[in-house]
Structures are given as C-alpha cells and as structure tokens.
Image (cartoon, helix red, strand yellow):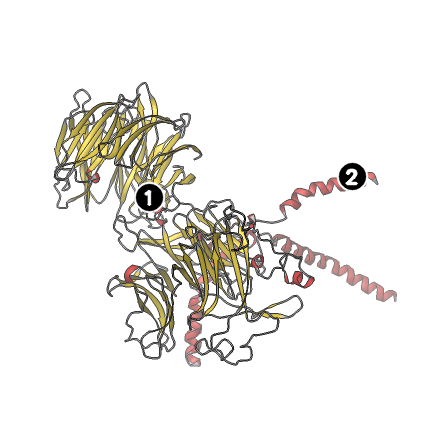
Amino acid sequence: MRNLALSLRLFLFCLLPTLTLAVFADEAYQTDYHHALVGVPQSHTTFFHRPSVASKASLLYTLSDRLVLGAVNPKDGTLLWRQRLVDSGRNVTSRGFLSAGDGESIVVSAVDGLLRAWDAADGRLVWEWSGQGRANALEVVEMEGVGKDVVVIHKEEGQVGMARRLSAATGDVKWEFRDESGDIPFAVASSPTSVYYISLHSALLKGFKVKVTELDPVTGKETGQNTLSSDSDVSSEDSILFVGANSAAPLLVWTDKAFKVLKINNIGSKHTTTVNIVNDGADDIEKISVHAPRTIKAQPHFLVHYQTAKSHWAEVYHVDLSDGSVSKAYSLPRVGGRGAFSTSTEYANVFFTRNTEDEVSLVASVSHGILGRWPARLQSYGGLADHEGVSHAVSEVVPKGDSTYAVRSAVTLKSGDWELIRNGEPVWIRTEGLTGVVAAAWADLAEEAQDLAQDLAVEGHQNIFAAYEHRVRRHVRDLQHLPAWLQSIPSRVMASFLGTQPASQQEGLHRDSFGFRKLIIAATEHGRLVALDTGRQGYPIWSFQAVDIPMGQTWDVHDIEVHERVAIVKGPGGQSLRVDTVTGNVLQRQSGGSIGSLETFVSVHAESGEKFMVPILADGSPGDVSERNLRGGTTIVTQGQDGTVRGWVTAKDTKFQMAWEFVPMSGEKVLGAKSRPMHDPVASLGKVLGDRNVLYKYLNPNLLLVTTVGVATSTLGVYLLDSISGDVLYTTTHFGVDTNRPITSIISENWFAYSMFCDPVALGEQDAKSSLPLPKAHQLVVSELFESPFPNDRGPLGSSPNVSALRPAASENGGIAEAPHVKSQAFVIPAPISHMSIASTLQGITPRSLLCVLPSLNALIAIPRNLLDPRRPVGREPTAAEMEEGLFKYNPVLEFDPKWFLNHQREVAGLEKVITSPTLLESTSLVFAFGDVDMFGTRVAPIGGFDVLGKGFNKLQLVGTVVALAIGTGFLAPMVRKKQIDGRWKA
C-alpha cells in the first residue's frame, strides 16, 4: 500500500510540468505588433562604430531628428537599444550632437545644455554633465600624449562662449576656456597637438569673420589666434560646410551664397585656398557637402559633393602636410538623379562610397579607379522607397584581399526610410519616415465574397429567365477556381489545427472572417500618408509624400475621415486630400487658403443624404453653405481661437445660426471639448442591481464634456453640456491643480472620466494649523450618469412620450433640461495619463475598457470598467446584493495591474493618441496607438474571447476523441448486438 502511494505521488510529480504549461497560453507578441522607431537619421550624427575594442563587428548609431539615440544591428536592422533625450520630438529647435572616439566603449550625446555618455553596447548611462546654455559643438578628440576626451562648446548668458574638456571616463571637467568677446561659438576642431575653438565674429558691414583660437590640450590656455577674412562669403552659419576634427590636417571649408567659390583653410594657419566651382550643367547647385575622415591615422584627403535638382558629381582633394597646401586629385563624373557620398577608413587608407538610385560604387582617395561597382535596388520592399532617391548615407568598407571589397551602406532615403545595402543588395529597411504621426483612422476592407453579393443583387433585379441564365454562367465561371480550392484543402486543414492563417487568405486585400484585418490610414507631420495592414503585423502597403513641407515646418492634420474606400485628410487652412485607401491613389486635392481665415472642415449631411464638407473659419464660425440644401436641425459644435465653444444649428434651407455659446469664467480658458465617440453602442438602458431592480442610465447622444483651467488659481473646471441646447447639466471644480501637467478626459455611454495632478484632499479638509504644503498626486476621476438616484425610477421625464433638449418639459427647474444624477469617485494612480480612449465592441454588450497612455512608463494600459464603478461601497464591505452585482469595497489607491499593460515588456515610446475599432466578434476590439515616435497595435478582449476558440484549444485532441469514439462504437456495436440476440434466445 505504501509503495502504491509512493508511485502515485511520483506519477503526479511527473505531471506537474505538463499541468503548468497548460494553465494559460499567452498570446502576447502574436496578435500585437510594434514599430519601434528612432526617427529619421541625421547626417552629422549617424555612423558605424565598434562598441568595444574587443568587438569585431560594428553597430550603427544615430541621433535622429526626433532626438532619439539608438543603436541598430547592421546585420538584420533590429533595434538593440535607444534613449529618448527629450520628452517630445515635436517642434524641436536643437539638432543635437553625437560623437564617439575610435576604440572607445562609449558614445557621447549633447542636447541643449546636457551632455551624456552612454555605454555603446547596452545603452546604459555612464555619466552626465549639465551646463548653462545650449551646446553648439561636441567632439571626442584624440591627441598625442593626452588620450581621448570630450570637448564641448556652449553659449552661456551674457554672450559668453565656453569651451570645456571633460574626461571621457568620468565626465569631470579638466579645464575650461572662457570667451567674453561676444562672438558666436560655432565649432571645435582638433589636431594631434592642439584644440581649436572656432567662433563667428560679426563684420562691420555684413557677414561673419571666422575666428580660430588655438588652445593647449593639457591646460586649455590660449596659445594663438587667427581671424580669417570670410565676411564676403559667410552670411550665416549654413555657409560653413565642414569643420574637421581628429585629423592630421583639420580643415575649415566654406562657400558663398551663390555656390560660386569654395574656400578651404587648414585650421591653425592663415592661408586659405580658393577653388572656383565649375558647374557644366543647366541646373543650379542646390547643396554642397564635404566628406573627410575623422581619425588621426587617416590620410588627409577629402571629397566635395555637389548636388543639383537633376544631377550630382564630386571632386577629391589632397592636403600636403608639409606646407598645408590643398590640391585637386581627381573628379568623379556627373550622374543623373540624387546621390550620396560617405567616407570610410581602414588604417591610413581612405575610401569614398557613392550611392545612387541604381548603383553603389567604391573608390580610393588616392586614385579615381573604381574598386567596386554593384547595381543597387533601392525600389524594394513593396516600392516604399521614393523615386526621389537617397538623402545621405554612411558606409563601412572591409578589404577581402585579391583587390575585392565588401561594402555596406546605411542609406537614408528622401522618404525618411533607412535602408541597408550590402554590395548592392538590400538587406533590411526601417520605416523611420513613419515617426511623427499626427492623425490616423481605420478603413474597413471589402469582403472576399463581395462580388458574389453583387451578382446576387443583379439576379434579384432581373426576370426569372435572365436570372437563371446569369446564375448558370456564374457557376460555370466559378468552376475555374475548383482546382485551386481542392489544392488548398490540406493547407486550410493544417492551418485550422495549427492556429495559423492559410496562405490563400494572406494574399490580396480583403476582410478576414472575424474582422481582425483592417487598414490604418496615418498622416505624419513630414507630409507623408501611409496605409498599415493589421493582418500583416502593421506592414505598410503603400506610402507616399502627400504634401511638400518646408524645412522647419510640420503638417498639422486635424482629422482623417474614411467613407468606404475613400479617406479624406483634413489639413491646415482648409486643405483636404481624398485618397483611395487600398491603392493610395490621390482622387482629389484641395489647397488651403481658398477661403479667408479657413481653419478646417466638418462633414454634415445634405437633405438628399449626401455628405459634404462645411468650412470652419478661424473664429469657429461655419462658412457659407447657402448653395447646399441642408437638413433642418443640423447641429455642429465649434471652438474658436479664443477658446469659446459655440453651437450652430440650421433651419431647413438656411445657413448656420449660433444657437448657444459657452464662455469660461473670468481667468479660465477652455482646455478641450469631448463628445461621445462616433461608434458608441448602448446594449442596455439600465444597470440590473443585485436585488433585481434596475438603475436607469442617463443616455443622451448629445453630451459634450468641456474642461477649463485657471492658471492663476490652479483650478480645473469640468462642465457637462447638452450640445443641442447648450444647457449645463453638471459642473465641478478642482483646486490645487498643476495646470502644466497633462490633463485629459473622455466621455462614453453614460459615464466620463478625467485625470489630473492635484491635491489628493478636498479644499478645506487640511488642518488649518498646518503650515505644510498639500501633497499632490495623480488622480483619475470617474463619474456615471443616471436618470434618478432611485431604482426603477426614470426621473421627471420618465412618463413623457417625447423629450426635446430645445423644448424641455416645464418643471421645477424653470424649463431647463433635467439634470442627471451623478455618482463620482476619485482614485490616486501611480503615473500620469496623457491620453484616454475607449475600447468598445460592435454591439456594446462587452464591458468597455478605459485605454490610457502612460508616457512616464512608455506603456499603454487597459483598465477594466468595473474597477472604475463609482458605486463601489465606501468605508464598508459590500452587501450580498452588491457582491452579486460585482461591486467591491472602494480603495482610493488604484494600482496598475501588470496584466493591464497591453505592450507587455515592450517600451512604446512617444505614444500620444489611441484609436479603436470594433471587430465582427463581440468580445474583441482593435487598438492602434501612435504619436511622436512609435506605433503599436493590438487586440483587446476585456472579458476574454468568449465567442471564439483560443489557441489553447486542442483541436487534435477533440478530433482524436471523436475518432476514438467512432472506432470504439464500431468495435463494440457487434458485441452488444450479439449479446442482445443471445439474451433474447435465452429468454
């Protein structure tokens, strides 16, 4: 007996791993997708670098235009690590700097006045140093007898320029040089024996003279100074093309505004070489760039790249170290289209790589002979690369022996995408041009059987003989698909068992069985439009430059509306664009500014049912629509530049007239106005209580939630309005609010929520004798609206057959619309919320989830709605009826459960907005989050996928059980039949 018990325990112990694996099958990273981006690489902050001396392979580093520092594996394009150096990459005024010394295990960044050194392998912070003013230049310099250190230049208060040398290992300041001349600090350069502080001195008439101050690398003392006569050419900082560093012969190169002459100065000397620029083409030169090695061991050779609108060429120059003279070595021929050059070094040898739209070529700096030439295919990956060609590139050259070379180039395209090409072959592409998304919308795909529905509709409108003939021809036509359908049976069966998608459903753009596959139309601030396929992990199916945006400006898209296969993109000043959602073809363009002070458009219905766009002016008033036959009673709500919220209504065949106006209190300004989502279904009119009574919801499709802030008084005002009549249905005020922190709100069905950073106690609750300031915390407030505080009571309007917001029934309120009964509760949350959205389903039966963006945690969470029920009992345990209803004791602190994090372990950076869309499954909603940097998409099932079998369902076991039962039944049936017959004979 003891042996039997021991054997049973051993058997159960062996089953434990299987039971553990069978608890829950997490679908993380299967149904979601994440575009972890860094932004468009900048030419001066992108390079290959070995993360340590022992490392044999290089990594690709960049500080993007979003001021995100990242390290990318050149082998497959995966992002190894990244660091956001600013809270938001929108409207940044600093380009930032990034530098790394040869053989150093750190990379050093400078943004504004903050210097940071990062471990090149894992991105951990090594040290940081903060100075006054903005960093104007940064270099990791290498000098004989001194080693490698960091030299940074700042412009501080009082027009004082500062140059400092910091230890590369610790960040300690070794010396500093102070320039009180009032000149503009511009750059830093270095030779093996000196450090050069370069500044711009304003000339008497116009232009700038370049002043070069030589500093002792050990003490930082001034040892010499030269002022170059450059005021006739240098009109701004952009006139200076190149400042060399870590070179045996550092150079200073500038040009004039007309690109007619090139001047080259060997830093440290007064001599300047003048080169006349020869342009044999018909197009004017648009840009000149200089490429030179940044290592002391390399030969002092450099390349000058000339770019026009239709062609480009280059010239290679050599510097004589004995006398500092500059001579032209050879020229690289003019080639059509845009191109990019990059510099690589191997010991003392210098190589120049040329990247064009259709070719990659390699030359050595000593001779014009082509060392390697490879045809390139930039138009790869579904044609995402624009035909405009490349913008800039960095390259790495490895000699293979026998006069062969391996070249890999990280090319930044004009589209903003980042592509790596190895010997002409594309290896990977990163869609960095998709950063800075400002608006997005869902677009449904047509069903695969849509053609069948159209055929059936045709047959339904024909006579019986024509319909029969049409059906026969349709059946004959369908026979051509029979062989392919028969061949797909095995793959569909295997896909059903393995839980994968059959290949036949992956081809083409059509809706899947559950409605999981949709398109996301997104617009970026760079002027690009892109369509993402949710059925292929957010893969872009088309992308193009919709609007040309000047340098330093952004595309301010107000909204994107989708009607069937047409996406309407509403830009600034009344600009609009109609695009086919499937192909990306532009159907119609409307430039902005056609109507004076035009701000945007809003869609309304005409009397015929057709939708058209109503122009909205800058003051919030609708434009002239007198030629349109409007539906009577059409109401729109606008917000003017002064913050005033107004409601506009039309009578039949008349223009819009202002119906009401909401003006905030003195000292307050309107922060935002939110209405219920377009898709906000209501599954039930009330809440069934635990005692089977019903508490009726206050359901009004015209609710408008307006938030105001008082900066001087640190207050937040919340107003609930009826958008038809303008009546204020509910209002509350919060004191001690930090108006500089994020304040966001949302309204749905019969409840609304908002978050803020304020005092966790109400005004007046603090001890009057206490002089300590009130502590502050992040709060989430949830309010729910009911028709009456009493169950089974519809309120004063319950017996009214018709209710109108414009003509409310006479009541004790004096003709004002009846206010709802409001229940509210506040929760202290551990992190700020920057945006809220609602995950709702097709019919609204599934409980909603509150989606929140947490910028401090780089996360997106879904808070279950039942946890935010303001009817939770306070200060006591719930009764049996309340427990049956799902209520539990109120806790003022709401901790974020790790299961709420939709991004799991991923860090989704820069999320700003969230949009959702229902699927054909009532349990599931699609979620897409976007913003300054990343894009993230997933599915949300608040109470689980109750209407679909999960991946954990064992279909093989089910089929095996059915087959075993069938075999067992077939085997036992004769035996049972024989036994029954024998029993009858015996009877």
Q: Position of residue 894 (x, y in %)?
A: 56, 51
Q: Position of residue 324 (x, y in %)?
A: 17, 23
Does residue 829 lie above or below 159 as drawn? below
Q: What type is the residue that disc 1 sits on? A: Asp
Given this view, does label 1 or label 2 mark the residue nearer the observer?
Answer: 1
Report which quarter residue 208 is drawn in: top left
Residue at image mark 1? 65
* Mark 2 residue crowding within 10 angstroms, few (<14) / some (14–19) / many (20+): few
Which numbered disc flags the more N-terminal residue, 1 or 2? 2
Q: Nearer the viewer, residue 201 or 327?
A: 201
Does residue 974 lie above or below 742 as drawn? below
- Is residue 786 visible in the rendered image? The answer is yes
Does residue 854 lie above or below 613 as drawn? above
Q: Helix or strand or loop: what does disc 2 sit on?
A: helix
Residue at image mark 2? 6
Q: What type is the residue that disc 2 sits on? A: Leu
* Mark 1 residue crowding within 10 angstroms, few (<14) / some (14–19) / many (20+): many
Left or right, residue 183 beside residue 732: left
Label 1–label 2 contact, CB within 8 A: no
